[in-house]
Image (spheres, coloured by chain):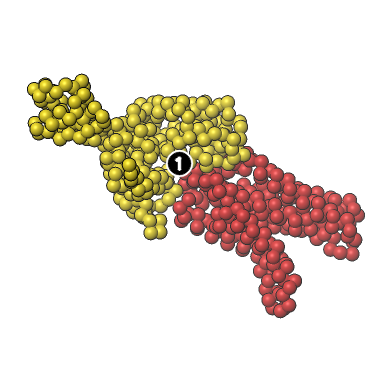
Chain colours: A red, B yellow
Amino acid sequence: MRSALIAEWTKQRTTPGAGWLLLITVASTVGLGAAVCAVATDQYDTVRLALSGVYLGQAPVAVLGVLAASGEYSSGLIRVTVAAMPGRSVVLAAKAVVIAVEVAVVASLALLVSVLVASQVGLSVAGEPVLRAGAGSAVYLVLVALLSLGVAVVVRDSAAAIGAVLGLLYLPPILTAMVTDPGLHRLLERAAPISGGLGVLTAWSGGFLVFGVLLFRSRDV
Amino acid sequence: MSDATIEVAGLRKRYGSTTALDGMTFDAVPGRVTGFVGPNGAGKSTTMRIILGLHSADAGQARIGGRPYRSLRYPLRSLGALLDASALHPARSGRNHLLWLAQSQGLGRRRVDEVIELVGLAAAGRRAAGGYSLGMRQRLGIAAALLGDPPAIMLDEPFNGMDPEGIVWLRGFLRALAGERRAVLVSSHLMSELQGMADHVVVVGRGRVIADSSVADLIAAASGDRVLVRTGAPREAAAALVAAGAEVTPASQNRLGVRAMAAERIAEVLAAGGVPFSELAPHRATLEEAYFDLTGDAVEYRAAPTEVTP
């Protein structure tokens, strides 16, 4: 597992794509957060406003998670990877750990800057609530990255996987707004990755990762 | 480095309704270059993918030094393989491509430097691999196959896209690897690429082995006992030889192919009949001719014979 982790980490850091996506994650998270804070006042949920950049920042995180797997399918590199590391679960686990750590570090940084920006424009964001919400948002982004990895392993195609993940993240809020039936409305809200809470998102990510591992182990590559 | 034979035993594989492998069986043993030859679609790549554990076989097994590939902890130390030289991330440098592969086998940067030097890519190592020519990618793939200093090497169509200089280099290189008691398995759809390099050939068609023999035996079998006769009087020569019991076919304007008669006897017959001749040459088949003899029935896709109307 150790050699697989080192190898996957080298893969991530030796292409420019991942670095750019992480940079875009920081820029979009901080940027949207700052824009929202600039027009907000203290009468709203200020912690939530300060961290609202996550709504935009999750998109590059999703792309990062998808490309970590599906990029190898499009080039055929996946065969080189599996020939070098025949333990397929180990390969997937190593990929998951590498992107989880990457996203955790970068998301924490982006959210910290977001909070600093919010306090600069005069919103009252301090203390334990903001710490808890910030940590939750970082975990949210890590789970989005893992969900994306799982989906990419299942569908093996970058465009399809990115479409599926972004659809899963952004469509439910739109659908929820359109649905009038209160029962269905509540179901959508509770089952959607973005609004169902970290537990629901963990189920989505875990489910896709497990499904991905099972397929990856049994399929010809 | 201990010896390792690549063993393929009774492999079967179907993709939907297509039978890719139909009982593929052969060994590539240490100390020799084994050519793995057959027309496109004969099952060469499928066999190699199964050897590497990328595809699963419906039946049969493949082993490296007695062990299934997927059970090897650091497989590149047992079998180095190149299947597709273009399987690269275009933005990653050749050196970094080798680096992650080395790390996955518990090896370090020093080994990367060694193999990149060995294949003559040191100067281009820091450039993005997406900008490499196909020949350079083949060299990078060969460097990757050598990373683990494995006792067995397997290359799928390594001559594709190589310039003449690269081909000469690779032939010598593979001979040298076999000289170090490594098992070397090289696939090709062109028998001529293997002439003068392979010791042994496994000829395949439609997913199974058609011939598994040393190159010398294969050529001897295909050469038969044909003797080429060069003569200024082909008609008279043919008449005399047929009368003496030989089978004669015209080979070109003033040459005849003669079967079922030894060269010495041909000379006697022609001399007795007063037929002038300038050359008697026992015909030696090329590896390619031997191959066409064997695979005549096994080619899946072939152009229809062209009718030439005068």
On the image, the x and y values in percent for residue B161 come to: 48, 35
Q: Residue furthest front?
A: B310
Host chain of mark 1: B
Q: Quadrant of residue A139?
A: bottom right
In this picture, residue A171 sits left or right of residue A113: left
Q: Return the residue nearer the eye: A126 or B177.
A: B177
Seen at 81% across and 51% down, the residue is: A31
Q: Return the residue nearer the eye: A105 or B27.
A: B27
On the image, the x and y values in percent for residue B105 come to: 50, 38
Q: Is residue B271 above or below residue A99?
A: above
Residue at disc 1, secondary structure: loop
On the image, the x and y values in percent for residue B287 come to: 30, 33
Q: Is residue B268 visible?
A: no
| Residue wearing tag 1 | B83
Seen at 73% across and 48% down, the residue is: A24
Seen at 53% across and 38% down, the residue is: B101
Q: Return the residue nearer the eye: B34 or B283.
A: B283
Q: Is residue A156 visible?
A: yes
